Amino acid sequence: MKTALILLASFWIVFLNGRAMDKKRMRPQFSIKGSMPFGYTLRWRCLIYLILLSQWSVADPIRIGGFFSTGITDANKDNTVLLNNQIENKTNYLADTVFGLQLDTRLTKETRFSAQLTAQDKNNSFDLAAEWLFISQQLSTSVELRAGRLRLPIYFISETINVGQSYDWVRPPLEVYALTGGLTNYNGFSTLYKYNFYASTIEAEIYLGQAKDSLRVKNQSLNVDTDHFYGGQITYIADRVIARASRIQTSATADFLDLGITIDSSAEISVVGFNYTQGNWSGLMEYGILETEDDGDTSAYYLSLHYTVDRLVPVVTFGSSRTNPDATSPTIKGSSVSLGVRYNFSERSSMKLQALKGEVLDGPSLVVLPGISGFDDEVTMYSATLNLIF
């Protein structure tokens, strides 16, 4: 009975709320300047959902954790865009602010339920969302089936992309992590396989589903709706090495609401990554390719070097992107270099400082996006964040 009620509540929040979003053509949110009706609806649903779960905390223990990041960012140009945030030539206190709450519980020995609710800033309004909300069934010691709202497993840190404490940068390198256009989750199904041999592990996953999101960049509203997609990833984990490859194929519709423009296209995204650790040194790189049916191809990579000295972790990161819109348009090139340092107060809290310089050749890159009447060819951005998990 409890399992059935949890499944019903999950369906209520994820799928029925998604249908309401389609009907209104907007994403439910609550704003720091005032809430909209759908925002109240979603918050009440989440509250009721948590209350339902708490009633079984004695019989079925629930592990509850959370994370929080906040900071300040400043840039010397007004045309700098970090996915859903526009950074102007003034201090921004909200761009890297995110709060998350995660709940995990076992309904039976083989059945697990997990939820992660987050509130983060997107152009001065906080969206309350279920980043993931799924039920999993352990079919064997090696095979697990999941269903619900799931994390899109494209990148090395896809699982913890909102948890600033889990990585050394202020934010993941945008050249590669912007290839998905800000989409981080989907509604659907996945099958995971894990195989251990000697001192290493192979993890593989295949998945299918659909995703929807509403973005606002440069004061332009954009709705992204994937009709369907499917993909997979495979990861090799050894003592000092982690190697990873992933691929997703989809067809999507992008509605630029303010401009009255609708674009239908199919796309494929492939990403490979490699992480190597030797003593205090570690190196991480990812290379991604976005191939679209009508809008050309984009390739991007970053290389990041980290050195740990007690509680201090200096970081240097190089990134580059290259877009070929079509046969008649010039190639768009972009690059960036960032220097940062992380100081760990403890295993659960840290402070990070970062300076980034981005440059554009012949057009806008993934770091510096175009303004309505032009673009800046260079930007310098400074950021500082405080991060914790609990």
Image (spheres, helix red, strand yellow):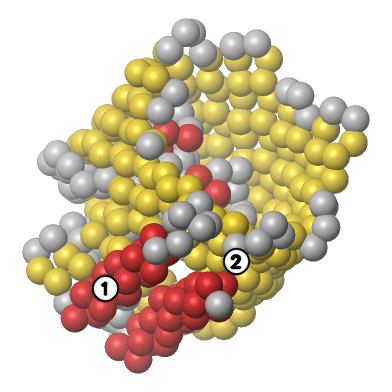
Mark 2: few, some, or many residues within 10 Å (few <14, many ≥20)?
many
Q: Residue furthest right?
A: 198
Quick one: SS at disc 1?
Answer: helix
SS for dot 2: strand
| Residue for badge 2 | 135
Q: Residue furthest top?
A: 310
Residue 134 picture quarter: bottom right
**x, y percentage for residue 34?**
10, 69
Image quarter of the N terminus: bottom right
First in residue order: circle 1 vs circle 2: 1
Q: Which mark is residue 44?
A: 1
Report x, y in % for residue 102. 43, 52
Q: Residue at x 27, y 45 (%)?
A: 97
| Rendering quarter of residue 4 | bottom right
Q: Is residue 285 left or right of residue 185?
A: right
Q: Extreme left residue here?
A: 33
Judge from the rendering whether residue 230 lies leftward or rightward of residue 333; answer left or right.
right
Q: Residue at x 67, y 31 (%)?
A: 275
Q: Residue at x 90, y 36 (%)?
A: 197
Comparing 237 with 84, the one in front is: 237
Residue type, mark 2 in image:
Ile
Can residue 261 be seen here? The reply is no
Q: Answer yes or no: is residue 157 visible.
A: yes
Picture quadrant of residue 355: top left
Depth order, front residue of 152/48: 48
